Image (cartoon, helix red, strand yellow):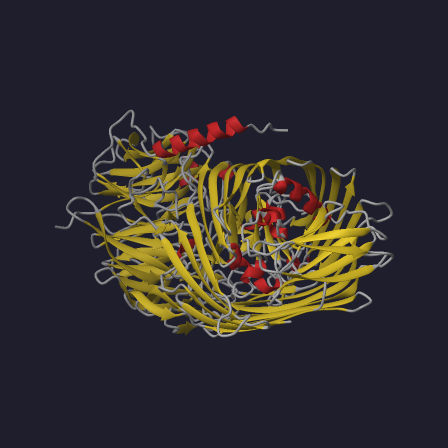
Amino acid sequence: MQNNISKWFFLLSCAISGSVFSQTTVRGSVFTENGEPVYGAAVIVKELRTGATTNEEGFFQLNLASGGTYTLQVSYLGYEPLNKVLNLDDKKRLYVNIRLKESSNELETVQLTAKSKIQQIEALAYNVDVIDAKRLHNTTLDIGHALDRVSGIRIRESGGVGSEMNLSMNGFRGNQVKTFIDGIPMEYFGSSFQINNIPIGLAQRVEIYKGVVPVELGADALGGAINIVTTTYEKDHLDLSYSYGSFNTHRSNVNATYVSKSDFVINVNAFQNYSDNDYKVTVDAANLNTGEYYPETRLRRFHDQYHNETFIGKTGVVNKSFADELLFGITLGQNYNEEQTGARLVAVYGARHTRGNIVMPSITYKKENLFVDGLDLKLNATINLGKEKIIDTLNRTYNWFGDYKEYDSPVGELNYSNLEIQNNNGIGMLSIKYDLNEKSFLSFNDTYTTFDRERYSYLQTENRNYDQPQKTFKNVAGLSFTYETGDWNATVFAKNYNQNIEFTREIDPGGSADISYNYFERKLNEFGYGFAATYFFDDKFQFKASYEKSYRLPLPNELFGDANLIVGDTSLDPEESDNYNLGVSYWLNLGKNQLFNIDATIIYRDIDNFIRRTFAPNQSRFLTANVVGSDNLGFEAQFRYNYRNKLTANISGTYQNFRNNNPESAAYRARIPNVPFLFGNGNIAYSFNDVFKKGNNLTMEYNLLYVNGFYLNWPLFGDRDEGKLDIPDQIAHDLNFTYSTPHFQFIVECRNIFDEILYDNFSLQKPGRSFTGKIRYTL
Amino acid sequence: MKKFNLYTLLFISLSLFITSCSDDDNTPNGEAYVEPGPYIITASPQESEGVADYLLTVETLTQGRTTLVGNGIEQDGTYRYYITNNNKFFSLLYGQGDPGAVTTYEMNSSYGLDKLSNFQAETVQSFTNVDDEVLMTRISRNSANPIASWYRLDTESSTIVGEGAINTNELAPGDEQAFFTWMTQVGDKVYAPFMSVKACCNDSFGTEYPDQTWIAVYSYPDMQLEKIIEDDRISFIGRYFRSGLGVVENGDVYAFSSGVATNNTEAVSTNPSAILKINSGETEFDEDYYFNLEEVAEGYYATNQFYVENGMFLVFMEPQESKGAYTDGGRLAIVNVYNETLTWVSGTPEESEIINISVNNYIENGVAHVGITTEEGSYIYNINASSASASRGLKVEAGTITAISKLDPVE
């Protein structure tokens, strides 16, 4: 069992990159004797020392040179290895079915070599975590809540289903961490298609890059990136699910793929979320007339309905001579969101709401070995023509009982508004990979984004302010060189960040009739760079180190405002950070069939020019501004245990020492407020096989979330015994039971079993105990 | 390329872990920390993120120091305002247009502040003591909604006991509407000086009437309009969120104007910064009294006024070349309204060094206590009105002084 991991890493990464020089596509499925698909089985081509692993459906695909004869070695933990000889002749395509027998002699070493795609990615030199989304398909999580279970990541949300979700990773927040879907940046997709409403069922896996981001994800991510990887077009697939739960929450999801014999593909993905979000909160409810508070009253939220409906259709061809993938797609969607509160629970609304939609055509082209062997090309283009609307036109004052006083004048609850904006976001992406030789390759990515906002105010139709241009063009280009040998591999890269900002300023502010505007243009240009390297001491022990000098260019909302509560600042500078990661992974076999894995990572971030939100002087809006210096030294660890794939357990924990690093500040070296610094997650799952009937399984899963308490304001100021504002320690327990038959799954889930009050920013309360039932059908 | 070094990182990590354990002991040097006492100082940390005020209680304002580090009662929200009435201290949240919680405190015998209650109040632009009630007024700057809503807070029960609305369009000339700069109790009436504003067309606070002044006189507690006192010798009295009226011992009212009316953001007042007088019991300006401050103030105008005693006001002044509608001046003067003299205060920092000056100040025994923050730190300056001299007193570490007040301990 020499250098198995490293060997496999190399071979499998060739398989990911798909740069094996070949012509015949071998596809196949691996099953057990019972006909259950085997997930994560290793399929090795003995002669080439190349291979693949099977996915959840037991499926694999290999590209081999035509005409040869090859031996496939198929192996999986607890099963007897099997060899199958393939004679390819001139076949373009070949399909093989493989059945594995359960092993009588259970001790095998293949569990380390049979890496899933997920393990392959985690074996990369980057500080990366991968969520195996398929394991979560039985839950009712959206992608955001799935991310909440990853070490180093905290999701902060303002309420229930569909509420504003903010991601923090190693102290970075919100836009400093970029989200991608299949490599396309999501920052411009609008409110109808975001991590708070995309069901986990859409994803195959979610890759989380911390601090150092590969050039393949072409964006200006200051602190890391998340890539959601969706459907692959291997074979027909149907996945239907519906769930109903507390607070009148309905969610459904259809995911269907059709692959014709001539490799014509149709993929439809549609999902819907609906919730009244009428969970109870504990508030000081005011009497509207006397102002008297009724402290600690338990009341239901009454204006928090959310729903969204999204359809994603793609069609095209795969595995053609001119294209491995040529797909045309459209994303259509809408959402409606009632706003129950402002930034804090004291501000309660009863009519204010937002709407948004998305109309986003797209085209994807992929080809490996284009013109020459080893040259892979990927092209992607999309434009979002969706609109966002903010409606606040009723002059009412509400309290938590739902009572209101109404006044007869045109004033809103928070900010009188009936405004529609269309941002016309276009994204173009080009990705090229070229194999220099068997051990090294070059990778180039260029991502170009445009933003051209149109605004229309239904209340101030004559105001020329809304006709002024707000445009940005952004280009992020990256080039990397990767070298891979048996026991180590390394990548070096450089990135260029370029932004052009166009806007106008009033020359005579205050003048009514003869306002004129001066046109301005600003150019930003920065260079970033970094490296990532990993070394395998032996097949059990991996060491990783990576560094990036990263930049983030200001977003349109930060430059121009969001046309609602955020006032922009066109003079913002890019944020920058030096990100360091150091990690080790250790795998251990404990007797038969038991696998133990530890990952530990130290991170260090040195951040400058942070773009932060602050209050405008009159307190009714937010300003954005660059703020100097902070740094973060953090530690993350994750322990995973697996017993014959029946029992899995994992625990992860994060500590981050995120502190003010500005010597001028009165809070120099103080812990940054309102950011959790110690949190963790535990998860244990057990599967019973052949329950009631052969082939039917029952899985029980328990999940624990812990967040240590933290202060909302600088911890060093004020007397901690005199009611300093904080978020207390939080513990939430979730339980999930899944009963699976070959095609159906029945799920019962209870989240927050003990009905703890869970908080987020500024003591916004999240839902209490909730029950959900889900039924899922897969074909 | 910045070189990545494992040892550097390990060293940083070690040193950070060590410093993180020890960053709370801030060893004092210099003057001694003062004990808790009847004076209340509110201060906000000199930091941009997570700004909240802290309430400190101190035994003296004239010496020693206190700190925000590990000390003080944290206040919710970023901007707060404070008023004392009925031996209670009220902390008001200036919410984002939303109602906010007002917290009521009283002082216990060990000089700690005990929270009596929370109640909800609207975000207001004027709040003033009227006997043992607080009159709070929310004023529109939107011509589509020319309404000022007032609320009467009973300080005994800490609840709103009355409310009403004023049509501000009816008070102001032409199409403009009234924006009350502040309200002041005069006898059993409430005097409400206002500026006339367009409240529209991207020029909310602009006016076509920059050289007139008005005071609306209301009965209390029913807030019925009794009269509008007018004059054209000065521009409007007070400023946005700043009081311009001072009542002296004999009941005479002195009205300060900054002369800072604007139109389309241009300063258009031709009347100088000056003082008028209303004699006790009358509802007309005294025709014979007019004190032009700009004539005696070497090119300065008045921005804020605080009545000390015996006809002496502490006045914040600002050079005319930096005239602005929202500026709090940094040069201090004692203005004697009886003999119409102005004396510059000695002993305060140079105007150019002042980062912040508190506008909610405490006055007792002929001494005004004002918080001034410079690069060197934040200090209470104790200004003796008779001698027009200031002495530097208590230092507040790590904070910017925003308000100063005092309560009697309750047994």
Front one among A359 and B333: A359
In this rendering, the answer to whether A728 lies above or below A588 is below
- In the rendered image, is residue A771 in sight? yes
A521 over A29 or under it: above or below: above
Q: Position of residue B227 (x, y in %)?
A: 36, 64
Pick the front one: B23 or B187? B23
Q: Nearer the viewer, residue B174 or A110?
A: A110
Residue A304 image position (x, y, % from top left): 47, 69
Instruction: Classify B142 as above or below B402.
Output: below
Q: Quadrant of residue B1?
A: top right
The percent position of residue A745, horizontal first and vertical second, equals 54, 71
**Residue sitting at the far top:** B30
Task: Using residue A312 as the reference point, say whether residue A776 is left or right of it.
Answer: left
Query: Where's residue A680, x and y in %?
Result: 43, 50
Q: Residue at x 44, y 52 (%)?
A: A681
- Front one among A344 and A756: A756
Residue extending farthest to the left is B411
The residue positioned 68% from the left and 49% from the top of the image is A503
User: Is residue A615 in view?
Assistant: no
Residue farthest to the front, as pictured: A104
Q: Is residue A546 left or right of residue A708?
A: right
Quadrant position of residue B115 = bottom left
Left or right side of A281 for A446: right
Q: Count the marks.
A: 0
